[in-house]
Image: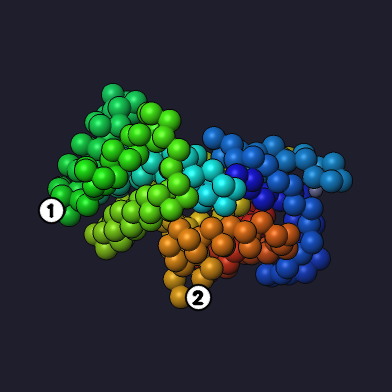
Amino acid sequence: MIVRLFCPKCALEASKEIKGSLDIEVPVPVSQLADDGRYEVRCGIGHECTVILDNIKFELLFEMGLNAMFDGYPREAVSSFTSSLERFYEFYWRVAMHHAGVPTAELDQAWKPMSKMSERQLGAFITASMVLAGSKPRLLNPNKQVPFRNSVIHNGYVPTKAEAIEFGNTVMELIFEGLDQLRELDSSSLMETYQIMSPRDYEEGENSEDSDELVGCVNILTAIDVRNPPKGDDQRVGDVGAQIKRIGYERQPMKMQLLTEQEMHRHHPDRVRVQDDE
Ligand SMILES: [Zn+2]
């Protein structure tokens, strides 16, 4: 999966010329997805900057699955959908624990012995749902989707496109159900947990006053999107089949849109933040 980034220096210069929101032509470097969300960008005119991708793992993993579907790799798609669901379990657990008042450092310690064991994580998720919502969450079907996933992940089974789409749709439904629940029960714990898990530093900010380095921040809108869930006539509305079409559309060349901090709260594709507190 390719992410479209931008050069913060070029973008800052462009934003000085015209105040407010604007469509601009800035060189848009692209990169392969990086695990830590940090990208060293070198633009066409030689600026070297850092850009942070302000998205969390399960959003990106699901998007990687969609990209794999678009590219004709259903096996890789099932693998990414599976990882997305597992990282969602962790997210849900962290929101529930945040809701219960457990400090983040304690959470990190508690997660460690579960971090390599997906069955323990599933147990944590089910327990968190019992505590938070008072009911057992919907899970993958143990007679159908679980053996399917295991045969793909562990036995090298190559699924058909239709099987991968069906599996992806189920994962998407499960995550949507969980996110809707979290939004309803404790949206502030949801948002705070998101900020803690994002590579963006929400506490310090990326651009400190005594640093010459300009750090940019970009958020990509995803099919599974914690903060900006698709609704209305958004291109991201729809099942996996519809999302695959969207991926094709998004791979066409596009302009970037520069937004102020206030405008960030509205819905826009390819949102880029260039100025901090100015
Ligand atoms: Zn530049």
Amino acid type for the residue under numbered disc 2: Asp
Residue 249 on image: x %, y %: 63, 63
Label 2 environment density (alpha carbons within 10 Å; few <14, some 14–19, many ≥20)? few
The residue closer to the viewer here, 117 or 245, is 245
Residue in view at x 20 percent, y 36 percent: 123
The mark closer to the camera, 1 or 2, is 2
Q: How far apart are marks 1 and 2 (CA)?
A: 34 Å
100 relative to 179 in the view: left or right: left
Residue 211 visible, this angle = no
Identity, as a three-letter code, of the amino acid under mark 1: Gly
Q: Which residue is drawn at 84% across and 46% down?
A: 44
Residue positioned 76% across, 64% down in the render: 24
Residue visible at 61% across and 52% down in the picture? 218
Q: Quadrant of residue 152?
A: top left
Residue 105: percent from left, percent from top: 33, 32
Q: Which residue is labeled 1 in the image? A: 134
Badge 2 element: loop
Return the residue at label 2.
233
Q: In which quarter of the image is the N terminus?
A: top right
Q: Mark 1 or mark 2: which comes first in sequence?
A: 1
